[in-house]
Amino acid sequence: MRPDFHPAYDHVVFRDRSGAASFLTRSTLAGRLPPDHPRVAWEDGRSYPVVDVDVTSASHPFWTGQGRVVDTEGRVQRFHRRYAALPQEGER
């Protein structure tokens, strides 16, 4: 590899804001974080930079099975109410 060409690739902890999940992984984001960026102690006793994210697989409704069902019946009824007063194709 060419020196100073590839971004730094090191360990980072991604922490879910909405859940209690944290993931230790490697990322090129580690090279772009300032030296005074917050760090967190991990299970192995070492300290890693932490990045807070809004959604992970631990909190996303698709992966947790807590997805909401859309009220399609209400939408269909609203559509019929809205366009029922319009004249039909042969009635004009």
Image (cartoon, grey):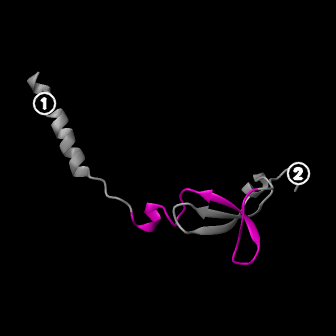
**Callout 2: helix, strand or loop?**
loop
Residue at (87%, 56%) from the top-left corner?
A: 1
Question: Dividing the picture into quarters, in which one does residue 65 lie?
Answer: bottom left
Residue 27 on image: x %, y %: 72, 60
| Label 1 Cα neighbours within 10 Å, binned few <14 / some 14-19 / many ≥20 | few
Q: Earlier in the sequence, mark 1 or mark 2?
A: 2
What's under tag 2, amino acid-wise? Asp
Q: CA distance from mark 1 to mark 2?
A: 69 Å
Question: Dividing the picture into quarters, in which one does residue 82 lie?
Answer: top left
What's under tag 1, amino acid-wise? Ala
In the displayed structure image, the side of residue 55 where residue 66 appears, left or right: left
- Of all residues shown, which one is farthest toward the top? 92
Which stretch appears magenta?
A: 37-66
Q: Mark 1 and mark 2 in contact? Answer it, CB < 8 Å.
A: no
**Callout 1: helix, strand or loop?**
loop
Q: Nearer the viewer, residue 51 or 81?
A: 51
Residue 37 on image: x %, y %: 75, 56
Question: Dividing the picture into quarters, in which one does residue 26 lie?
Answer: bottom right
In the displayed structure image, the side of residue 19 where residue 5 appears, left or right: right
- Of all residues shown, which one is farthest toward the right? 3
- Of all residues shown, which one is farthest toward the bottom? 44
Residue at (14%, 27%) from the top-left corner?
A: 89
Q: Pointer 2: what residue?
A: 4
Magenta-span inclusion, residue 59 = yes
| Label 2 Cα neighbours within 10 Å, binned few <14 / some 14-19 / many ≥20 | few
Magenta-span inclusion, residue 20 = no
Residue at (78%, 60%) from the top-left corner?
A: 9
* Image quadrant containing the C terminus: top left
Q: Which mark is residue 85?
A: 1
